[in-house]
Every structure is written in structure tokens, then in C-alpha cells.
Image: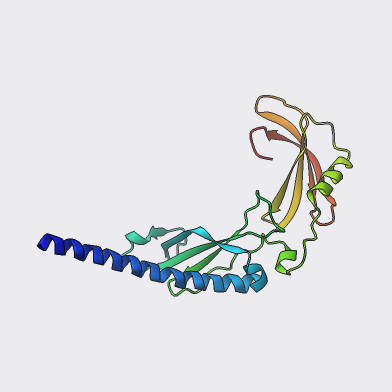
Amino acid sequence: MKKTITILILILSFKSSFSQKKELEPEVIKKAEFYLKKAVGEDLFEYFELASWYIEYYQHKSKAKKRIRKKNYTRKKKNYINIKKVGFNLNHPDFKYENISKYSTVILDFDLNLIEKIDIDYIPQFLLENKPSNWLNENKIDSIAETNKMKKGIKPITKTLTFDTKSKKYYWKVTNQLNEKSRYRCDMEVLEIHPVNGIVLKQYETEYNIHREF
């Protein structure tokens, strides 16, 4: 009988702790959604989906890289602050490029205050302004590449939408493999094309590792 009672107590305790853990999650998500909506606007916010991952840890107050997991935290570690990271994925019909990273992270402290600016630099201006896309379609990019006197390659040209993290701008990167110098190396002709006006920003040749992604 005592054994049965003990088991029941353990089960109830587990359920209680589980429900307490779940009670916090909606509050955190609601606050994260509030800050994201403020950053991107209500219209664009509708196209964001909550990511499947959620991170929580303790970070040193003066040494940002010094972190410990939540389960290893004790009250003795007074120099650490609680950090919560909530991720959101952007899924917009006018921005369906698979190779582009399209997520924003909302970083909150223990009191659910925003402690870092939300990164929305990757979002094109037309989306932030709730306007139709003014980007050239991929067929037009192909046409620009064909009329730009690219050399004869040994394989079909490839194109990749690329985001420059320094300039915070997009460009189409068109690559044309010219030869195969060895098993691992080749010369590549590259065009960088502006996605809106179609201007060729750069044209150059460079040596590539064949097994890297262009």
C-alpha cells in the first residue's frame, strides 16, 4: 500500500512539474511574437512561423561567450543571467528561395525583455513595405547571363541567390565552369547580378574547389 502511495505521489509530482514547465512557454512565445511583430510590422508578421527549436541557458554578465546549461545553474552563480532564444521562420510566397536563411531569433532575458536587436536584415525591402516583389524573375536572370558574353563552359551554368552579410544586400551569383584542372579544382567564370535592375555588379574568373557549392 505504501509503495502504491509513493508511486502516485511521484506521478502527481511529475505531472505538476510538467504543467508548470508548459505554463511558461506560452508567455515566452507571446512576448517573442510581440517584439517580432513590432520589428517587421503586423502584415509581414502573419507569414512567420514559430520554429521547432527553443534554447534556454545562463550567460555570464560580463563574458557573453561563457555559458552554462539551465540544469547546471545554481543560485550561487550570481554572475549569470537567464537567456531565452525563440526562433521564427519566414514563409512568404514572394520569397521562396530555398538556399537563403530566412529566420529571425528573438532573445529575451529572465523578465522577458528584449536584450538584442532582432535580425531582419535578410528581409527584402518590398516585404517590409508590404509591396509586390520588384525582383527580376529567374528567367530574366538567365537571359542577362546569356547576353553577357560568358565563355563556353563544360557544364550548364548555375545561379544562386546570395546574401552579402557585410553590405546587407542580395545578388544573383551565376557560375560557369570553364574546365576541370584536376579531380578537385576548376576555373569558374562568375557573374554577380543585381536582383532588381539586372545590372552586372561583377564579372570575374576564379579557381574553385569542385566539391564546394557554388
Quarter of the image with the N terminus in it: bottom left
Whether residue 160 is visible to the viewer of this picture, yes or no, is yes
Residue found at the very far left of the displayed protein: 1
The quarter of the picture where residue 76 lies is bottom left
The quarter of the picture where residue 66 lies is bottom left
Residue 41 horizontal side relative to residue 78, left or right:
right
Quarter of the image with the C terminus in it: top right
Percent x, y for residue 148?
Answer: 88, 42
- How is the model colour-coded? rainbow
- Residue under the image location 75 percent in, 52 percent down: 171
Between 188 and 94, the one nearer to me in the picture: 94
- Residue under the image location 84 percent in, 56 percent down: 197
The quarter of the picture where residue 178 lies is top right
Percent x, y for residue 32?
Answer: 52, 70
Between 163 and 203, the one nearer to me in the picture: 163
Residue 109 horizontal side relative to residue 126, left or right:
left
Percent x, y for residue 100?
Answer: 65, 52
Percent x, y for residue 128?
Answer: 70, 67
Q: Above or below — where is 135 with respect to 111?
A: above
Count numbered badges in the picture: 0
Between 3 and 83, the one nearer to me in the picture: 3
Q: Above or below — where is 175 with respect to 117?
A: above
- Residue under the image location 45 percent in, 62 percent down: 63
Whether residue 77 is visible to the viewer of this picture, yes or no, is no
- Residue under the image location 53 percent in, 59 percent down: 51
